[in-house]
Image (cartoon, rainbow, N blue to C red):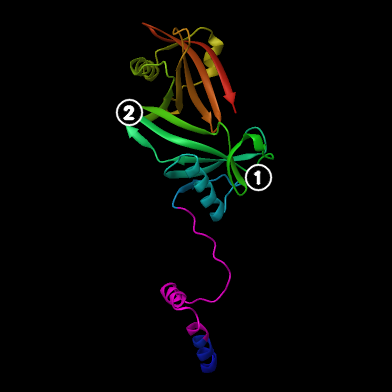
Amino acid sequence: MSGDEINLKFRQVMRLPWPLFLLLLAFGLTSCGTPKSPAAPAVKTRFVPEAVLSNSELREIVDLAHECGVSEVEEVYSYNIHPSPSFGFGVKSVETVRGREVSFIVVLVDHKKWVRPRNARQVERSIGNLWVESGSVRTNVLTTFALAGGTVRVRLSPGLDLATADRIVELLAAGRISYKDATLKDELGRIDLSKLAVLWRAEDGKSFTIGLSCGELCVVYADVTISADGLTVIKVSKLVS
């Protein structure tokens, strides 16, 4: 830039109202150029290759989670909605720990690009191409169990007391398991306690359900009864969602 051009720029700036001139000095004088992409929020991300958010979308999904009651976001992730070709997103809050209890909020979010068209009647909150449908915000409460190979986090049913849950895990760890039918052992396969995800008490209070993770959205369930000899498996089923 020549000296005459610099003098011209200076005279143009000096004609600005004094407060605006001071504001420009405070933030620096810049020329118009290519807008910069907004920086990504400081949260962990875990995206599958088929569904990845841009930095601006990442900021929007965090803002959306804030509107849904999440005060502090820990992680944003994507997943396949099995068995469809669609993908969804999840926002996980920072965890709260009280003794053996761990709690956190998960907000499930849809994106226009990766899922079916939205039904306006089911949408509770939306920003841009992202939206949250009714029933997509849940608080998760997990209980920790110390095992020989480490600690697992398990969801307990409201009617299951901690002493009984500890007893079930103790019997599983000791291998004190029998089967009502020999075929059930083949269906259940080897029990990997590091995959333990769910413990439920049946409504009749006489049987319990053990849930073992078999994938991202896959759980194998075993219905059991308790006796002095240990656990007896009476039914095995598999849920893939």
Q: Is residue 99 above or below residue 89?
A: above
Mark 1 or 2: the one toward you: 1
Task: Tell me the quarter of the image containing the C terminus.
Answer: top right
Most extreme residue toward the front is 17
Classify mark 2: helix, strand or loop: loop
Q: Amino acid at mark 2?
A: Arg
Residue count near mark 1 (Cα–Cα under 10 Å), binned few <14, some 14–19, many ≥20: few
- x 42%, y 15%: residue: 159
Residue count near mark 2 (Cα–Cα under 10 Å), binned few <14, some 14–19, many ≥20: few
Distance Cα–Cα, label 1 vs label 2: 39 Å
Query: Magenta region: which residues?
Result: 12-41
Q: Residue 112 got which mark?
A: 1
Q: Position of residue 71 (x, y in %)?
A: 42, 43
Q: How many marks?
A: 2
Q: Amino acid at mark 1?
A: Lys
Which quadrant would residue 227 be assigned to in this image? top left
Residue occupied by mark 2:
100
Which badge, 1 or 2, comes first in the chain's sequence?
2
Front-most of 178 and 42?
Answer: 42
Q: Is residue 108 above or below residue 197?
A: below
Residue 26 on the magenta segment? yes
Q: Is residue 150 visible?
A: no
Q: Position of residue 226 (x, y in %)?
A: 41, 9
Q: Is residue 81 above or below residue 38?
A: above
